[in-house]
Amino acid sequence: GTVGGLGFAAAEILARLGAKVVVTVRSDAKGEESVAKLKLSTGNPRCSYIIVDFLSKASVRHGAAAISSAHSRLDMLVLNAGVGSGPAADLWMSNVVGPFLFTEILTPLLTHTAKVHGDVRVVSVSSGAHKKAAINFSQPYESPENGPFSGPYGQSKLAQIMHMRELQRRLRA
């Protein structure tokens, strides 16, 4: 998450390097806590937050549009939002659909930044669950075979990696 864990660690490293950091959170309380911790631990005053609930397409669209309108460049996008358990539809929305939509909306800003300022990076935090998964395209919410990672979670992680590979292919073309 953005208040602790990998998301906060990534934000903290980038803030320490002097980057302007915008974290996504699901509430003002989490945003204020995260930004206060970032500013305190890094001394970087250029940290802010925006509310994005990756379980809501409307929230994802609103958050990405707000970032696009408020910033003239985006050098790095770290996709860390996600869930490991719960209803299959929530797994797919939080782990795949939300980050996919967020990235697609921000792609013009990423492309502009790359053309004007050089390379950009999109980093998607995943897990090894994709290694044992196969996507059941006709029933993505069901397990195509038995195993802890063959169900919706593993499939969502595999889809996430497929998205990153396709994004890389498209942006390099």
Image (cartoon, grey):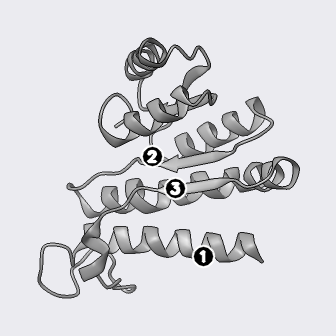
Q: Are circles 1 and 2 on residues that touch, CB within 8 Å?
A: no
Residue 47, horizontal then vertical, whole percent: 56, 21
Q: Is residue 138 left or right of residue 66?
A: left
**From mark 1 to mark 2, how far is it between C-alphas?**
21 Å
**From mark 1 to mark 3, how far is it between C-alphas?**
13 Å
> Please, what secondary structure does the residue beneath circle 2 have?
loop
Residue nearest the observer in this picture, 32 or 17 = 17
At label 3, the amino acid type is Val
Q: Which residue is mark 3?
A: 123
User: Of label 1 and label 2, which has the lower sequence position?
Assistant: 2
User: Of label 3 and label 2, which has the lower sequence position?
Assistant: 2
Residue nearest the observer in this picture, 40 or 52 = 40
Q: Residue at x 58, y 48 (%)?
A: 77
Q: Residue at x 75, y 33 (%)?
A: 71
The residue lying furthest to the front in this view is 17
**From mark 3 to mark 2, how far is it between C-alphas?**
16 Å
Location of residue 63 by image quarter: top right
Q: Which residue is mark 1?
A: 166
Q: Residue at x 35, y 68 (%)?
A: 157
At label 1, the amino acid type is Glu
Residue 127, horizontal then vertical, whole percent: 30, 63
Residue 135, horizontal then vertical, whole percent: 35, 83
Q: Are circles 3 and 2 on residues that touch, CB within 8 Å?
A: no
Question: How many labels, in total?
Answer: 3
Q: Are circles 1 and 3 on residues that touch, CB within 8 Å?
A: no
Residue 158, horizontal then vertical, whole percent: 38, 74
Q: Which residue is mark 2?
A: 54
- Is the residue 102 above or below the residue 59 in the image? below
Location of residue 151 by image quarter: bottom left
Q: Is residue 172 left or right of residue 149?
A: right
**Foreground tag (1 vs 3):** 3
